[in-house]
Amino acid sequence: MKEKIRIDYNSRKSDGFVDELFHPIHQMFKVRFDDGYENIFFTDVDSGRWIEQDIGFTLLAEMVGEKINSNHKSGGKIIRTLHWYHSTEKMDTSPVNFAFFHYYLGSFPVFEIYAPNRRFLFSMILVNKDFWQVFKIEDDWSFSESEKLMKKLPRILEEIINDKD
């Protein structure tokens, strides 16, 4: 659904054209402004605040979120307490850095994995000691580090499971 919002930002009125992006975890919208700027805005599952993708918690994200919230009466935001994992271990040229939300589905450990920008990447379920099942959102594989991260996660997540037991 395309809609138009008007924002008073940096002492100037700006029109934004909003497209809702399906996402089961975040409220997520792509906004294209009349000055040519565009970005994806989504809710942070840890705080419920609005984020401007790859920029963070900005005044523009807050203003866009207020407009979207006034136009979309959603069934409520999903709130999770994220835990952050930071390691100096190199994943090619960058350190391993992600957030996760851990819970059990029956007896199976589940980890929702989030990128450093707080966007949901995928879920991993430990089916048995040698097999992890990955669930991702179709057509949402936009983060280049995701596959590299996914290969390192079984060892890291198994350590987290063992520490909790």
Image (cartoon, rainbow, N blue to C red):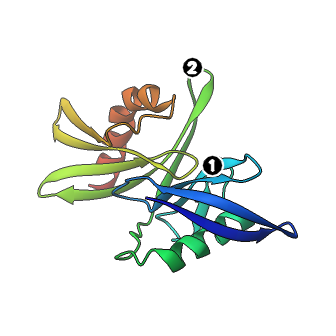
Q: Secondary structure at mark 2?
A: loop
Q: Residue furthest right?
A: 11
* Residue 87: assigned label: none
Residue depicted at 37% across the width and 36% down the height: 139
Q: For this view, does 61 lie left or right of residue 69? A: right
Residue depicted at 45% across the width and 62% down the height: 27
Residue depicted at 59% across the width and 74% down the height: 67
Percent x, y of residue 83: 47, 57
Position of the N terminus, as image quadrant, is bottom left
Which quarter of the picture shows residue 57?
bottom right
Q: For this view, does 81 lie left or right of residue 56? A: left
Quick check: can you spot residue 138? yes
Residue depicted at 43% across the width and 52% down the height: 21
Percent x, y of residue 14: 75, 63
Q: Which residue is mark 2?
A: 92
* Foreground label between 1 and 2: 1
Q: Secondary structure at mark 1?
A: strand
Percent x, y of residue 82: 46, 60
Position of the C terminus, as image quadrant, is bottom left
Percent x, y of residue 70: 53, 79
Which sits in the foreground, 38 or 77? 38
Q: Which residue is mark 1?
A: 39
Identify whether 12 is placed above or below 22: below
Q: Residue furthest top?
A: 92
Mark sitting earlier along the chain (1/2)? 1
Number of callouts: 2
